Image (cartoon, rainbow, N blue to C red):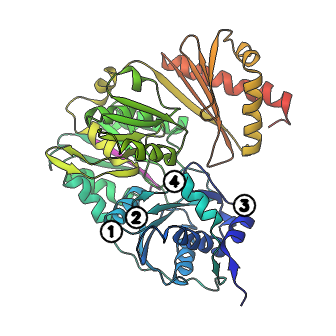
Amino acid sequence: MNKLMSSQVITDSGIAFGTSGARGLVNDFTPDVCAAFAIAFVKSIDNKFSFNTVALAIDNRPNSYAMAQACAEGLKQLNIAVIYYGVLPTPALAYKSMQDAVPCIMITGSHIPFDRNGLKFYRPDGEITKEDEQAILQNDVAFLPLSQLSALSVSNDAEQTYINRYAELFSDDALAGKKIGIYEHSSAGRDMYKSLFECLGADVTSLERSDTFVPIDTEAVTDVDKQKARDWSKTYGFDAIFSTDGDGDRPLVADENGEWLRGDILGLLCSQLLNIEALAVPVSCNTAIELTCSFKKVIRTKIGSPYVIAEFVRLNNEDFNFAGFEANGGYLLGSDIRINGKTLKALPTRDALLPAFMLLSQKEPISKQLEKLPQRFTASDRLQNLAEEESSKLVTVLKKETSSFLAKIGYEQNYELDTTDGLRIILESGDILHFRPSGNAPELRCYTESDSEEKALSLLRNALNTINEVVYKKSHKPI
């Protein structure tokens, strides 16, 4: 049987790395493609780390298990043993693997559309960087085509280790008296969240578990999910509602009124409660971070956890405790910290639980905690089914025609441009309008910020409507 070369298989697949992990259409993740990625990943790091085992876990997408089987079959050809943890939140897999000093692969499409999936890679010391991604793509390893996929036995060790991380950090009455709703849908962590919240004293109600995969996007919460949270809060009298995206690394938290918090505001509050000294956050995060004057250092990065983690390498050489978070809510703890007289180990990958527990363990209602922050409001949405190439062309057009575009949406004023990631237009009034092609799905992302929620939403709607109806049709074919 003729052998395949990993780099050629990956190239021919059309699958590419996005803001976090390799993403592509389900049909493109054939067994040989999954094996090629797994093998190339292991070979790209085997000169830096000593290991003979790789850990695997999956989300609840229908084809994720078959992808894990294919990764395992490929790794067998390198005499690499596999520990399979089944359906598990990404941070749980990453944390267990870091404690065991082994690499891991998470099979997940996170929040992206149902017809897509992905692979996330972690070295024994944490999430891979953009340089590691290139090493995977360029690594040329020969392997045999896969002829069959073997069943995988599930270990529960990673789930228990992740539960213990928080059960041992907080007292068993940390959430006593709190009524919490868990919006379970198809989240990878839905089988552990209820018991974990209950072991900390909360009165928990499970909400809307789904037998089909639901691609929850914590940066673009649907109007349906917004109304659900308000209705649930009125019906049950919740103190908060907790949920996550598909692979459990992005939190979605609603206050006692059923209003979902923006992810960067959740991260900001968490960082203050943890007494974090230095932050690395993407350029799209709310400017209230700097306005609080709570941090000795704030670094702004391109969007995507690998860019945040790249700054962690630099911060690790400075005398700060440090963390990062993204506009999607994922919280990355860069250094060990002390909480409740105990040490919480670093977890430099997106985590949904830490920010939720920090806010909920406070005596004040979440809405009261929010009132203490500078009043800066953000909104976000996307134009879907738009290829990255077309999104990039649109951003180029907007950069050239910024003044005329602003006039069309009623913002004829001075502005500054920030091209750290996409096009960020900072208006003289302090309002912000930011466009960028998604790195994970065929979408153009749009973020806005203003001093009121109504103004941020209005700016968002006007911008997207104008692009859809005027700018795009003028420069390209209609959507």
Q: Which amino acid, by three-letter code, is at mark 2?
A: Pro
Q: Identify the image quadrant of the N terminus.
A: bottom right
Mark 4 element type = loop
Can residue 304 be seen? yes
> Label 4 crowding class (10 Å Cα cut-off): few <14, some 14-19, many 20+?
many
Residue 260 at least partly seen? no
Q: Earlier in the sequence, mark 2 or mark 4?
A: 2
Going by the numbered disc 4, the residue's amino acid type is Thr
Residue at the spot of label 2: 124
Query: Mark 3 sits on what residue?
Result: 14
Q: Are marks 1 and 2 in contact (CB under 8 Å)?
A: yes
Q: Indicate the quadrant where residue 31 lies.
A: bottom right
Which label sits in the foreground, 3 or 1?
A: 1
Q: Quadrant of residue 432?
A: top right
Residue 326 horizontal/vertical position (percent): 46, 39
Is tag 3's residue or tag 4's residue first in the polypeptide sequence?
A: 3
Residue type at mark 1: give it.
Asp
The answer for how far apart the CA atoms under marks 3 and 1 are is 33 Å
What residue is shown with label 4?
129
The residue under the point 75% across, 30% down is 468
* Residue 148 to residue 109: above or below: below
Q: Position of residue 470 (x, y in %)?
A: 80, 24
**Does the magenta stretch mainly form a helix, a strand or a loop?**
strand
Tell me, for residue 100, which label it has, or none: 1
> SS for tag 3?
loop
